[in-house]
Image (cartoon, helix red, strand yellow):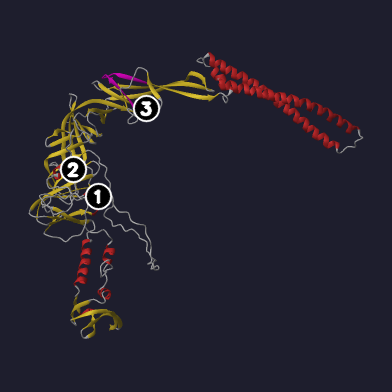
Amino acid sequence: MNIHHRVRRPMFLLLILVNLMAVSARGGSQTIGASGDDSLPVTGVTLFSSGVGHFRHEGVVSGDTEITMAFDVGDVDDLLKSLILQDYDGGFVESVTYPSKDPLNRILGSFSLNIADNPPLARLLDRARGERVRIEGTPSVDGIIVGIEYRGVASDGAVIQVPVLNLVTAEGLRQADLADIRSLRFLDPVVQADLDAALAVIAANRQEDKKMITLRFGGDGVRRVSVSYVREVPVWKTSYRLVLDDDGTAQLQGWAMVENTGESDWNNISLALASGQPISFVMDLYSPIYVPRPRIRQDYGVAAAPQQYDRDRRAPADAPAPELTYRDYASESVADEMFPEDASGFDAAGDKSINLSRGVTAVARSDGESLYRITRPVSVPRREAAMLPIIGTSIPAERLSIYDSSVLAGHPLKAVRITNDTGVQLPAGPATLFDGSIYGGDARLPSMSEGEERLLSYAVDLESGVIVRSSSIPEEIINLKITEGSLESTVRLVSTTEYVIDRLGDEDARHLIIHPKRSGWTIEGEAKPSFETQSTWRFEIDAAAGETTTLPVVEELVRSRRFALNTIRDDQIVFYLSQRIIDAETRRTLDRIRQLRADLSARESERRNLETRIAVIYHDQTRIRDNLQALESESELYRRYVEILDGQEDELQELAGELTAARNAESAARKALGGFIAGA
């Protein structure tokens, strides 16, 4: 994109994206939009599937010209982001101006006479104190406004306050009753112009949903100019008619629905419909943005003392001064590069054009997108819509019935498998199908790339019935192995789903069975799917007329489970030892684990028994010592208790040795089990 500097040269082109500054209007003035002026009409429109449209206006101007265009207020942000102006044949673009979006009260408050609150005459004149005015009335006089005072006047038995204007005149102070003033004019032209401007702002903001954009072109003689921009539009839609033939083809007719929601009629314009979805966004460029600034107190400071600075370094004497260069655009023709005769601007190497309908050229772009160029002139009045034929061709179409139990349990759906061999991308849209001349049903055609196949179901196939039977076998262990201290068990589950098709019609039919995928399951057996999607398997089967056809779909799920050998239960070990598929090495390992566990369990039991015996003796000794405290040391019972304590102490000493040995044996058994499992 080339942007010219505004310089006085014989021939140049100015391309302006956003250069918004106020200048005085010169030359002629034209208005485009609701007025219906054709001086700068719409000549080209490209509509995109992402909900935006690229519009181009072209016309002829003479001399310095001002053109006004009306836009919805919601389109102004897009306009400021994408507006491109071009003045050919030696002219230039002066400016683009538009009404501010500042709040009306803020704008009105900026004038010398604030009328934002719709003040009465007395309040307005009070705000204008010190201004010179000319009054026509009783009296007629020129003077300077001093202010407004209120005077009590009797009326119908009551006193009302009447405003009176105080003036300084050549004869001195005078008063004028506001009710006696026929007209009043400010003698200062600046104040009068400010009041007129404020009233003009109020008038301009009365129609809040429309904004007038003023374009100014400068130059001599008659010149060609163009204006282009991008704005939000309704998404152009597509609908199809599909007429099925008996030769394996179908006549495809596509219609595009477009809406003219702008302020200008489309009269014999060049229209293009693009399937691409360019990234587009709205940014608020219209609303004024005020950045809060800190308020700094004036710092008067103190007198500064003389300063000393380091010596400057001298620049090299031979250093050349920078040279300003300007590009000469006079001999270049960038307009034709940016805006070819076709308003779409989609010509590129690698694209190919295909005639899909009379008056329509479909362009298959090298990046996969498609563009439908309406080669005949298109006319759509503002605020109206139109249906335009864009496709009329024959495509391959195969009849079949589709059964999907999640859609309809008892019957399949009549369907057709179509192939997009048109050479271009087909946009998504509804499709009405006809079986010959008879209405067949409706379908939804998804977006189809070139060469892509799609299924379209459009009616219930009452000539076929489908019964679904399901069965499964119990889980079967197919492999056992021990690795890294764990027992890995591989199991298999098998599930069979039978689709029984009862063909009631008098003609054979191809059926497509859609079977849902399950995570981890694979298809086994003789019946293999013809196609698969991310979530389904698809099986094709021919059903003979008057016969029953069965399609068994066998699925298998193989999964593994791991059990840590140090936590596996004895009953689980017994279960796995009973399996026929267990190999000799795994059996020996599990048997050895059982033996080591049994030995460890015996050592644990022996240790617990000894600990229990010692605990009982300690408890009995506590009882005896309590009794000894209550007996005479010379009594017979006292001596007996002492003898018992002596015997228990001997036994405790013996049990302590046995407990140490039992604990050592238990620790050895536990180490033996752990070491064996670690090495398994």
Check disc 1 and report the residue beneath it: 318
Mark 1 or mark 3: whose residue is earlier in sequence: 1
Q: Which residues are magenta?
A: 536-553
- Find out whether residue 99 is within the magenta segment: no
Asked which secondary structure carries label 1, the reply is loop
The amino acid at mark 1 is: Asp
Dot 1, how many residues are within 10 Å of its Cα: few (below 14), some (14-19), or many (20+)? few
The secondary structure that most of the magenta stretch takes on is strand
Note whether residue 500 is visible.
yes
Where does the image place residue 313, in percent across and percent down from the top left? 32, 54
Q: Residue at x 51, y 24 (%)?
A: 562
| Quadrant position of residue 347 | top left
Check disc 3 and report the residue beneath it: 517
Q: Would you say 247 lies left or right of 522 here? A: left
Choose mark 1 or mark 3, whichever is in front: 1
Task: Report the disc number at residue 449.
Answer: none
Check disc 2 and report the residue beneath it: 46
Where does the image place residue 521, in percent across and percent down from the top left? 40, 24
- Find out whether residue 537 is within the magenta segment: yes
Please state the total of marks drawn on the protein image: 3
